[in-house]
């Protein structure tokens, strides 16, 4: 279970870095015209790909471990949130109106918070076992 703890902590750190990048990115977006949002957003997808690489690496480590039922459910939910986050980023990159950009960014923030909560849950559960 110690490896699970490390996996969740590593992922949590990467998510926090990505969250910080998203905040900086959205702040810089305020100085960009809405029509140029897609150009500014390309770096967001690049950063997401780095985060996704960390997630993929952690998933590969899980393959070798037998996860308890809670671990399998948590892993499934996290995988789903990563897939949905990728779609959110694509939609955010294609948004043209300021209102839509704000809505898409909020969806992305919500997913990040949910993934961070899942990491925290994983850490707590792995410490209990």
Image: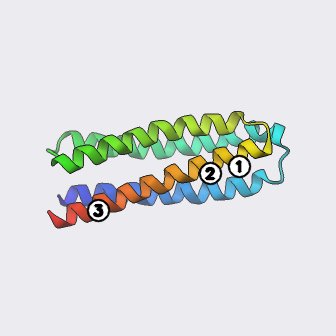
Q: Residues within 10 Å of mark 2 (few under 14, many from 20)?
A: some
Q: Residue at x 36, y 55 (%)?
A: 118
Reading the image, the residue beneath label 3 is 123
Q: Residue at x 83, y 53 (%)?
A: 31
Disc 1 element: helix
Mark 3 and mark 1: span between their CA atoms? Answer: 32 Å
Residue closer to the observer: 9 or 35: 35
Label located before the other in sequence (3 or 2): 2
- Confirm or deny contact between disc 2 and disc 1 (CB under 8 A): yes
Residue 26 vertical placement versus 55 (above, below): below
Q: Residue at x 57, y 53 (%)?
A: 109
Horizontally, residue 39 falls left or right of residue 11, namely right
Mark 2 and mark 1: span between their CA atoms? Answer: 6 Å
Residue 44 point in image, percent of width and height: 63, 44
Quarter where residue 18 is shown: bottom right
Reading the image, the residue beneath label 2 is 106
């Amino acid at each position: 279970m110690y490896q699970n703890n490390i996996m969740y902590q590593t992922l949590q750190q990467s998510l926090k870095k990505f969250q910080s990048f998203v905040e900086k990115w959205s702040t810089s977006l305020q100085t960009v015209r809405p029509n140029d949002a897609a150009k500014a957003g390309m770096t967001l997808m690049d950063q997401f790909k780095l985060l996704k690489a960390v997630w993929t690496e952690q998933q590969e480590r899980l393959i070798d471990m037998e996860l308890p039922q809670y671990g399998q459910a948590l892993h499934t939910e996290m995988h789903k949130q990563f897939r949905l986050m990728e779609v959110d980023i694509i939609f955010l990159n294609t948004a043209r109106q300021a209102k839509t950009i704000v809505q898409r960014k909020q969806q992305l923030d919500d997913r990040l918070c949910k993934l961070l909560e899942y990491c925290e849950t994983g850490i707590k559960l792995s410490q209990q076992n």
